[in-house]
Structure formats: C-alpha cells, structure tokens
Image (cartoon, rainbow, N blue to C red):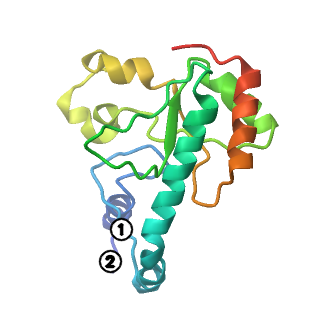
Amino acid sequence: MVTNDDEIARIARLIANHGQPRKNEHEVEGRNSRLDGLQAAVLSVKLPHLEKWTEARRRNAALYKKYLANLGIILPKEPAYSRHVYHLFVVRVANREQVIERLKAEGVETGIHYPTPLPLLKAYQRFGYTVQDFPVAASQMHQLLSLPMYPELTEEMIECVAKVLESVEVQLV
C-alpha cells in the first residue's frame, strides 16, 4: 500500500498488525496480513515438518502433564473429540507473578498471552462490555501463564521447569 496520508498509513498498519499499535493493545479489529513472498517461501519449506512438530509438542504436553500432575496447577485439557496441537501450554496458578519471578530467576522464560479478555479490548469498547459481563474470564485473566512450549524441548528441560514450579509453592486457584 502506498499513501501520502499519515493517518491512512497509521490505520493500515494497525489493521495489518491485529489492530494493535503495541502488543496486546487492540484499538481496532485487525488481521495478520504480514505474509510476504519471502515468508511464504520459508513456510513452504517448513510446512512438510508440521505433523512432526505437532507430535513433538503433544509429547511435550504429555510430559508437562506427567511432571505437574500433583502440584495443584490447573493444566490444559484435551477433549476426546479433538486433537490439541499445543501451540501454547497455558496453565492456571493463583500466584502468577510469584511463579513468573521464580521461573525467571532460574532462567525459564514464560509468557502471558492475551492478558485482556477480547470483549474488553479497546477495539470492542463500542459494545459497552464490562469485566462483570464475563465473570469466568475476569476470574482467570490474572492466573493464566504460558510455559515454554516448542518441539525441541527435551524431557530434561520440562522436568527442570517442573522442579522450579514445585519449589515455588504454587497457590491453588
């Protein structure tokens, strides 16, 4: 897109970046339209590996579930009618900030994905929703935490994350 209008350029950038000027601040409804020719070429090389990577993520999720089973952490569930690909491994803990700091001190990076419930984003203010309209989302928004998840994780790495979590004394939700 080419324009000499700064406002049109700003809005186009917002739309092309999920409607967000900064991470997790969605001002308008947007899309992910950042796939150029070079990225498409890379994707065509990576796509044949997708099933193998998915199975590695599923294996890693099973290991997390094994090592975290008795810590009181709420783990992802996989309904019998579906096959989770575990793009993220999101758990729930009551003392999220304490858990993040302890993991970080041990060199374990975590993430907080989608920290604001979608209906409460600026992009949807026009509907007038409040946090009280979504009690489940409101009760969980400060408890969700993404643990490291990628195909190359080893069992030793997952066991290390579990040991750190065990040492934190995770508060039950």
Residue located at (46% from left, 60% from top): 54
Residue at image mark 2: 3
Residue located at (36% from left, 55% from top): 18
Mark 2 to mark 1: distance in Å?
Answer: 7 Å
**Is 125 on the left or on the right of 92, as rendered?**
left
Residue at image mark 1: 9
Q: Quadrant of the image for the N terminus?
A: bottom left
User: Percent position (x, y) of residue 39?
Assistant: 46, 79
Does residue 18 lie above or below 136 as drawn? below
Q: Amino acid at mark 2?
A: Thr
Residue located at (54% from left, 38% from top): 112
Earlier-in-chain disc, 2 versus 1: 2
Say what secondary structure mark 1 lies in.
Answer: helix
Residue located at (59% from left, 39% from top): 64
**Is 6 on the left or on the right of 82, as rendered?**
right
Q: Residues within 10 Å of mark 1 (few under 14, many from 20)?
A: some
Does residue 88 lie above or below 11 as drawn? above
User: Percent position (x, y) of residue 44?
Assistant: 42, 83
Do labels 2 and 1 touch, CB within 8 Å?
yes
Residue furthest toward the left?
Answer: 127
User: Percent position (x, y) of residue 20?
Assistant: 40, 51
Residue 169 lies in what quarter of the image? top right
Q: Amino acid at mark 1?
A: Ala
The tag on residue 160 is none
**Is 119 on the left or on the right of 151, as rendered?**
left
Q: Residues within 10 Å of mark 2 (few under 14, many from 20)?
A: few
Q: How many marks?
A: 2
Question: In this view of the protein, which residue sits in the foreground, 155 or 42?
Answer: 155
Question: In this view of the protein, which residue sits in the foreground, 24 or 155?
Answer: 155
User: Percent position (x, y) of residue 70?
Assistant: 60, 21
**Is 12 on the left or on the right of 74, as rendered?**
left
